[in-house]
Image (tube, rainbow, N blue to C red):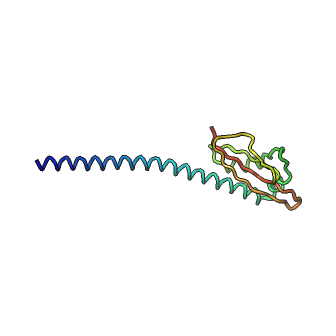
Amino acid sequence: MIYINNKRGIIRILEAFIAILLILGAVVIVFSKFSSKSLEDQNIIETEKLILEQLAGNAQFRDEVIKMSEISQVSSELNNFISNRIPAKYEYEFRVCELQSVCSASNYHEVVYVHERALSSSIKQYSPKKMKLYVWEEG
C-alpha cells in the first residue's frame, strides 16, 4: 500500500515538472520573437542616424540639401547614397524642409522609423534646413 502512494506522488511531481517546462518553453519562444524584433528596430534607427550624419558630413551632399526647397527632387546621387545603406527589405522616403515646418511623409504606413537632423548652413550659403528620413518595412 505504501508503494502505490509513493508511485502516485512521483507521477504528480513529474507532471508538475513537465508542466513547468512547457510554460517556460512558451515564454522563451515568445520572448525571443519580441527581442529579435526589438534588436532589428534598434539597427534601423542606428542606420538612419548614421546616414543623416554622413550626409551632413559630406560637403557635396550638404550643399545640395541646403539649396533644396521642399518640393525639389533628390538627386540620383543622393538617392543612391541613401538606398545603398538601407537594408533590402525596407523602403524609405527622404524629405528636406524648413526648420519650423512639420515635414510629414507623403505616404503613411503602419510602422515607420523616423529620424531627423538639422543643417544650418554650407560654406557658401546660410539656409537652415531639416533632413528627415522615413523608413518602413516593404510589403
Q: Position of residue 41 (x, y in %)?
A: 60, 51
Q: Is residue 54 left or right of residue 15?
A: right
Judge by depth and name the residue closer to the eye, 81 or 72: 72
Question: What residue appears at the point 30 percent right and 50 percent down from the top-left corner?
Answer: 17
Q: Position of residue 131 (x, y in %)?
A: 77, 52
Q: Is residue 84 above or below residue 126?
A: above
Dividing the image into 4 quarters, which one contains the C terminus? top right
Question: What residue appears at the point 23 percent right and 47 percent down from the top-left corner?
Answer: 11
Q: Is residue 59 left or right of residue 30?
A: right
Question: What residue appears at the point 67 percent right and 43 percent down from the top-left corner?
Answer: 91
Judge by depth and name the residue closer to the eye, 104 or 12: 12
Question: What residue appears at the point 83 percent right and 44 percent down from the top-left corner?
Answer: 71
Give the image quarter of residue 110: top right
Judge by depth and name the residue closer to the eye, 80 or 48: 48
So how many labels did they put on this image? 0
Q: Position of residue 78 (x, y in %)?
A: 77, 49
Q: Position of residue 46 (x, y in %)?
A: 64, 56
Residue farthest toward the bottom in the current orientation of the protein: 123
Q: Is residue 25 left or right of residue 122?
A: left
Residue farthest toward the left in the current orientation of the protein: 1
Give the image quarter of residue 122: bottom right
Residue farthest toward the top in the current orientation of the protein: 139
